Amino acid sequence: MADFTQKKIKSSKSVGEILRAARKKKGVDLADAEQETKVRAKYLEALEDGRYDILPGSVYTQGFLLKYVDYLDLDKDRMLTQFKAESGARGHLTRLMPERKIKEPLFTITPRLVTIVIVILVVGGILGYIGFSVRQITTPPNLLISSPSSDQVIKENKVEIIGKTDEGATLAINNQTILLDDNGNFSQQVKLNPGLNTFEITATNRLKKETTKELQILAEY
């Protein structure tokens, strides 16, 4: 009878299956293995289940594997080689950095930035105020006559002219200066002659810009 050389059949078991079988053969549970290897039970279980996605970077994972393999009296080189083949040279275990980059904020609020913003706001406020003030004095003042209305017929020999102009302006009725209050309001009583009375009311600002309105009142008394 011819002699046949027996050919060793390589195991088709995965790393996880080999680890689990070796642990059960040793008669220990994951808690015992964790205490002996100092590797957390959840990582040992992940190695047995082939759940490489919850394991840390490859350097740490390979360290865990070697401790576990040594504890279970398995061949370190063979197990490590098979593990690398299963996880893949370009798998997620070879990455020590997270797959997604942490988005950095577009800008960081610093004391320097706060100071710059405050300075810009202050300067902007000052420039805005200056611009407003310049417009106030370079533009002819506003002038409003609220009473009486033009061409009104008055049955008395006097009437009160009431109105408003800009703050800081001066007011004259027929070249006679009229006092204003702090808000530019004025009220001046004037005499009327029988017939048509014409009043020229002029408001003047600091740059001598003028606004003039003519008021005609018919007096019948």
Image: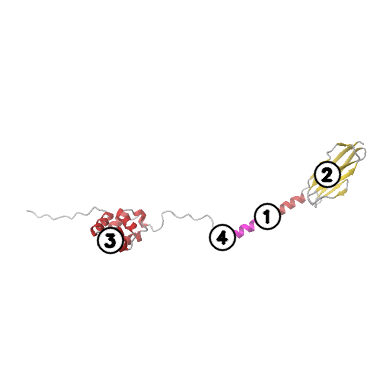
The residue carrying pointer 2 sits among few (fewer than 14), some (14 to 19) or many (20 or more) residues within 10 Å by Cα, namely some
Of the 4 image quadrants, the one containing the C terminus is top right
The answer to which of marks 3 and 4 sits earlier in the sequence is 3
Q: Amino acid at mark 4?
A: Thr
Residue under label 4:
110
Residue under label 2:
162
**Which numbered disc, 1 or 2, marks the residue closer to the eye?**
2
Cα separation, mark 3 vs mark 4, equals 51 Å
Cα separation, mark 1 vs mark 4, equals 23 Å
Q: Amino acid at mark 2?
A: Ile
Q: Amino acid at mark 1?
A: Gly
Rendered residue at 32%/58% (across/down): 44
Q: Which residues are magenta?
A: 112-127
Cα separation, mark 2 vs mark 4, equals 56 Å
Q: Secondary structure at mark 1?
A: helix
Cα separation, mark 1 vs mark 2, equals 35 Å
- In percent of width and height, residue 141 lies at 79, 47
Q: Secondary structure at mark 4?
A: loop
For the residues bearing labels 3 and 4, Cβ distance under 8 angstroms: no
Q: Secondary structure at mark 2?
A: strand
Rendered residue at 63%/58% (across/down): 118
**Which numbered disc, 1 or 3, marks the residue closer to the eye?**
3
Cα separation, mark 3 vs mark 2, equals 104 Å
Figure check: 138 above or below 62: above
Q: Is residue 175 left or right of residue 3?
A: right
Q: Is residue 33 magenta?
A: no
- In percent of width and height, residue 12 lies at 24, 52
Residue under label 3:
69
**Residue nearest the viewer, comparing 1 with 61:** 61
Residue under label 1:
125
- In percent of width and height, residue 21 lies at 25, 56
**Label drawn at residue 38:** none
